[in-house]
């Protein structure tokens, strides 16, 4: 039986400085050091919560007696030492951070759906000609906005799921997402979380996807074990 995919996410809107410090204190030394190098408060918060969710997901999905080293990689998702069969992806937007693990290649993207003027003109950097034509057919602004985020997030997730060598020769515009997923190698999951759009692109066949909201206070105890 194929196992479900669990997407762990947390809302950081009410994250206090005290709780953020507690999360930082229980991170492994390498992640703590990298967090302290970050000058932007937003990037530091997203990094701390993202790595907290990663450790939370690892400990929930695998019977680890000790936590394996998390290896940070420039311009790529981190990897887990000793686990060649774990693929992971992390995404954040506004106040939401999410993390997912899978036995096959996977990519996740979440975007806060802010209002956008002149959506057609602003879609040219990632939509193909056919997708732009489809967007133009949608006369209502709300419908255009939904299509904009569905395509954008799906393409971002698909790009993240690709091998690094494939990413170097791929652009968002070159990913025509209906064709990308119809071919059968990749599956697509899309979901709304309040005013956010989440997309998940993954290999290995269709799975049930579960969204799991994480209490960061509870994670201090889990991650600190």
Image (spheres, rainbow, N blue to C red):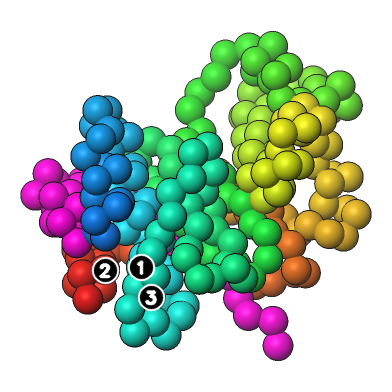
Give whichever of 45, 87 is nearer the camera: 87
Q: Secondary structure at mark 1?
A: helix
Q: At 54% across and 43% down in the image, what residue appears?
A: 76
Q: Secondary structure at mark 2?
A: helix
Which image quarter: residue 205? bottom right
Give whichever of 118, 223 is nearer the camera: 223
Q: Is residue 67 visible?
A: yes
Decide: marks 3, 2 in contact (CB < 8 A)? yes
For disc 2, the marked residue is 223
Q: CA distance from mark 1 to mark 2?
A: 6 Å
Q: Is residue 47 magenta?
A: no
- Horizontal side of 35 relative to 17 (left or right) equals right
Tell me where residue 122 appears, x and y as whole percent: 65, 15
**Residue that protrudes farthest toward the front in the picture:** 82
- Mark 3: few, some, or many residues within 10 Å (few <14, many ≥20)? some
Q: At 40% across and 77% down in the image, what residue appears?
A: 60
Q: Earlier in the sequence, mark 3 or mark 2?
A: 3
Q: CA distance from mark 3 to mark 1?
A: 5 Å
Tell me where residue 24 appears, x and y as whole percent: 19, 52
For disc 1, the marked residue is 56
Q: Is residue 15 magenta?
A: yes
Decide: marks 1, 2 in contact (CB < 8 A)? yes
- Mark 1: few, some, or many residues within 10 Å (few <14, many ≥20)? many
Give whichever of 181, 76 is nearer the camera: 76
Placement of the C terminus among the 4 image quadrants: bottom left
For disc 3, the marked residue is 59
- Horizontal side of 50 relative to 174 (left or right) equals left
Q: CA distance from mark 3 to mark 2?
A: 8 Å
Task: Report the magenta residues as a range.
Answer: 1-26
Placement of the N terminus among the 4 image quadrants: bottom right
């Amino acid at each position: 039986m194929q196992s479900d995919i669990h997407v762990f996410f947390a809302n950081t809107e009410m994250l206090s400085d005290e709780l953020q410090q507690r999360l930082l204190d229980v991170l492994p030394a390498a992640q703590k050091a990298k967090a302290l190098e970050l000058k932007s408060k937003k990037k530091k918060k997203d990094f701390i919560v993202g790595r907290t969710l990663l450790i939370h997901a690892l400990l929930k999905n695998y019977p680890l007696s000790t936590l394996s080293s998390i290896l940070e990689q420039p311009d790529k998702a981190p990897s887990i030492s000793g686990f060649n069969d774990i693929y992971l992806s992390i995404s954040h937007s506004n106040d939401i951070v999410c993390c997912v693990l899978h036995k096959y290649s996977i990519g996740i993207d979440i975007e806060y759906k802010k209002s956008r003027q002149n959506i057609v003109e602003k879609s040219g950097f990632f939509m193909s000609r056919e997708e732009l034509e489809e967007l133009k057919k949608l006369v209502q602004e709300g419908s255009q906005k939904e299509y904009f985020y569905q395509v954008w997030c799906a393409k971002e997730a698909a790009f993240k799921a690709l091998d690094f060598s494939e990413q170097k020769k791929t652009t968002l515009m070159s990913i025509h997402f209906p064709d990308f997923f119809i071919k059968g190698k990749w599956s697509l999951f899309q979901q709304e979380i309040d005013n956010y759009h989440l997309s998940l692109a993954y290999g290995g066949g269709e799975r049930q996807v579960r969204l799991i909201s994480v209490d960061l206070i509870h994670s201090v105890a889990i991650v600190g074990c």
